[in-house]
Every structure is written in C-alpha cells, then in structure tokens.
Image: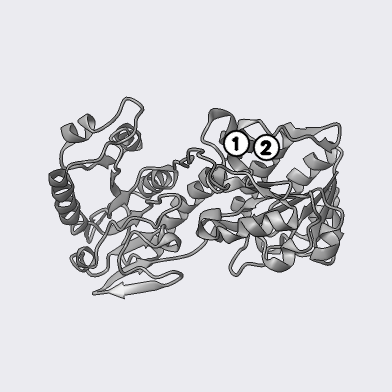
C-alpha cells in the first residue's frame, strides 16, 4: 500500500496532510509513504524530518502519485493534480463539494474514489476524525488574537496609579466549535464576553465558559426547541425583536466575532452595514464566515475594511494561519480515518461503514453520495453543522 502526500498548490494554503508522527504510524502499518518535496515547508516540517520518520521524499507531484493507493491532501486537487492520480486510487481531502459540484463529475471520470473529510458524520466514533471541529477550534482562537491585534486598547481590566482601564466587551455570534473557543480565548485575555446562538441548548455551554448568553426572550426560544434539540422556525415578531435587541447590544461592543455557517448555503447575514456604523470608532469585527459569503455586510474576502472607524476583518484560511498546529491536528484526523480500514498493510474499506457512507463522494467511476448522486427517489441527506 502506497500513500502519497502532495504539496498544496492553492494560494495561501500553508497546511500539509501528514506529519512525521503520522508518517511513522503509516509505516508501522506496513505502508510506503511518499511525500512531495517541500510539502511541509509552510508548516515548519522539513523534508529531512519526513525522511527520518520513514517517508520517501519525491521531487515532483507526478512521481509522488505514481502507483499510489491513497492520496492525502488538504484542499481539493486542481485539474493537473487529479490527472496524476491512477484509476481506483483513494483521494482523502477537504473537498467542499457544495462550492464546486462539477468536481464530483471530474473525480468520477478520473476513476478516483474521493472522500470528503468535511462531510464526516457527527457521531461519537468519528470525533477524532472531524476536520471541521479541529480546524474550527483553531480558527476561533485565532479570530480573537487577530481582533486583539487590531484593537487599539487593552483587553483585560488594568488598575494603575494613573487610573483604571475598563475591560474590552466582546460578543461572539454562534456557539459552535469556533465560537466556544473564541469565548474561552477572549475570557483568558480578560475580556467581558457575551454570546448568542439560534439554539437555546447552547446557553449552558456559553455560561460554563464564563460568558453571558444574550437573547431577547428565553421562554420563546425554549418553546421553539424540539425534543431532538433542534430549533423550530421562530415567529416574525420574535425575529424582529431579536434583531433589534442584537443591534442594540452590538452597538455597545468593542469586538464582535461571527462564526455562523450553513452547509451548502451562503452564510447568513448577521450584521448589517447600519449595525457596523453604530459601533464605536476603534471597534473590531472578525467575520469567520467571509469565504462562504460572510456574516457581516461590509466584509470582503481576504481584506480588512474600515467602516466609519470600525475594522471589519475578513481573513481567509484562518486555521492555516496557525500552520504547524493546524497540520498536526488535520494529519491526525486523516490517520484516525484511515486506520480502521488498513488490514495487514493493505487498504480494506468497508463501504457500508457509517464513516465511509458519510464521506465517500465517488466510487468506481460513479457519484455515490446521497446528496449528489442522480436522484432515484432517494431522500436528500442534510449535513448539519
């Protein structure tokens, strides 16, 4: 069994799909590991470290992919990389198929069995394989660090002989993995933190981290929650009151971090242009959803926009800006995904396994994922963040 690790070609991608630690484990399973030269440079992993771990360093992507059974990447392959992969090889990567559904046809035509790590089912057994969680955790942390770097004041309360500095007020919108880490990080830096989420069940998690949960009507949210923990559609009156409440709350904040994403759809707009302009000059907003359309009306991909003295930060690949840690966690996610299907040094995929049915996009030249396969009266499977 040969495993190929390619150097990422996408602009600003700093991560790599393997580390010396995971290479050692693949080799111990009986695999031959080929790493393209320079693959770990941006993650501070030298070719020598990969070689010391048991990998073979190969000069070109073509030679790396030659006769590979498994190809590991961070981002989806471009046309040139896909053309290097042999029929029947397994591509394991973050493939983001909703944003490029035509790519599935290309994988099928190339005869490549593609597995989207960003489609990992949210089940207990797969937690150690969940790339969205591992990368979002780092993104939530980095969002607070980015905000603090742009904020022209101190984050914690400081009492000095010259006077007292008030702590920064931080609002985190969305209490998923990224949001909870942002809350924890802002609290560690000494800020006064509040948070909001469409799920009332998030209240306990938010408060356990020392933040306050802000909502206009707790009782209405409780009644709107189903027995399965999901939220029912809220009334127009509630939506109006909630929007007004959040707008007033945002105006008092020094830093706002937005994290709301909906798989397969544009990110919801949480903050309007008017809300931004109502904030104090010197305030900072970090839009972690900017690459999916953005939660903040004025945000722009890859830019920091100034709106009446308010900085709106739209950094891309936020987890990748912590390249070493992001690569370490991502590589372990891939290792944990593959390990159960390696038997005596060979890949033996159980195509009925829930982890496989959730991530497999193509197989034997066909699109097989229920969300994308040709409709045969089969129900669409919703991927829930």
According to the picture, the residue beneath numbered tag 2 turns out to be 336
* Mark 1 or mark 2, earlier in chain: 1
Question: In this image, 179 relative to 352: left or right?
Answer: left
Q: Nearer the viewer, residue 261 or 45?
A: 261
Is residue 176 among the parts visible in the rendering? yes
Residue 200's place in the image compared with 54, above or below, is above
Does the CB distance between marks 1 and 2 fall below 8 Å?
yes
Residue 137 lies, with reference to residue 315, above or below; the image says above
Residue 342 lies left or right of residue 374; in this view the side is right
Whether 128 is drawn above or below 76: the answer is above
Q: In front: 264, or 242?
A: 264
The answer to whether residue 75 is seen in the rendering is: no
Quadrant placement of the N terminus: top right
- Kindly state the secondary structure of the residue where label 1 is placed: helix
Q: Nearer the viewer, residue 279 or 125?
A: 125
- Where in the figure is residue 50, as x and y percent of width and height? 80, 53
Numbered mark located on residue 128 in the image: 1
Residue 104 percent coordinates (x, y): 62, 55
Question: How many C-alpha atoms fall within 10 Å of the one at disc 2: few (<14), some, or many (≥20)?
Answer: some
What's the residue at 28%, 35% (across, down)? 200
Q: Considering depth in this image, is 376 or 93 the residue closer to the camera?
A: 376
Residue 197 higher or lower than 166, as above or below:
above
Q: Residue at image x 83%, y 52%?
A: 68
């Amino acid at each position: 069994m040969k495993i190929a690790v390619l150097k990422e070609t996408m602009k600003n991608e700093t991560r790599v799909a393997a580390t010396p630690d995971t290479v050692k484990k693949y080799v111990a399973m009986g695999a031959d590991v080929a790493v393209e030269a320079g693959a770990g440079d941006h993650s501070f992993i030298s070719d020598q470290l990969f070689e010391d771990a048991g990998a073979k360093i190969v000069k070109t992507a073509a030679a790396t992919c030659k006769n590979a059974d498994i190809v590991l990447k961070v981002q989806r392959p471009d046309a040139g990389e896909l053309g290097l992969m042999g029929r029947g090889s397994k591509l394991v990567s973050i493939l983001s198929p909703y944003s490029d559904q035509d790519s599935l046809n290309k994988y099928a035509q190339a005869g490549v069995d593609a597995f989207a790590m960003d489609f990992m089912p949210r089940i207990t057994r797969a937690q150690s394989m969940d790339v969205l969680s591992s990368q979002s955790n780092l993104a939530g942390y980095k969002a607070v660090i980015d905000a603090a770097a742009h904020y022209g004041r101190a984050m914690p309360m400081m009492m000095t002989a010259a006077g007292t500095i008030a702590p920064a007020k931080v609002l985190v919108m969305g209490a998923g993995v990224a949001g909870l880490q942002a809350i924890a990080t802002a609290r560690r830096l000494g800020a006064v933190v509040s948070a909001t989420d469409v799920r009332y069940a998030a209240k306990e998690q938010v408060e356990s981290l020392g933040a306050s949960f802000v909502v206009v009507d707790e009782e209405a949210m409780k009644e709107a929650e189903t027995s399965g923990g999901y939220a029912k559609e809220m009334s127009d009156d509630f939506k109006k009151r909630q929007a007004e409440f959040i707008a007033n709350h945002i105006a008092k904040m020094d830093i706002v971090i937005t994290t709301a994403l909906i798989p397969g759809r544009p990110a919801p707009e949480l903050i309007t242009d008017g809300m931004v302009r109502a904030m104090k000059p010197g305030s900072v907003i970090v839009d972690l959803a900017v690459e999916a359309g953005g939660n903040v009306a004025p945000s722009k991909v890859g830019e920091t926009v100034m709106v009446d003295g308010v900085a709106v930060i739209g950094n891309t690949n936020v987890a990748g800006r912590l390249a070493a840690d992001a690569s370490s966690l991502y590589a372990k996610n891939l290792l944990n995904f593959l390990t159960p299907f390696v038997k005596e040094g060979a890949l033996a995929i159980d195509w009925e396994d829930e982890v496989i049915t959730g991530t497999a996009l193509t197989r034997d030249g066909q699109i097989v994922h229920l969300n994308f396969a040709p409709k045969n009266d089969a129900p669409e499977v919703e991927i829930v963040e």
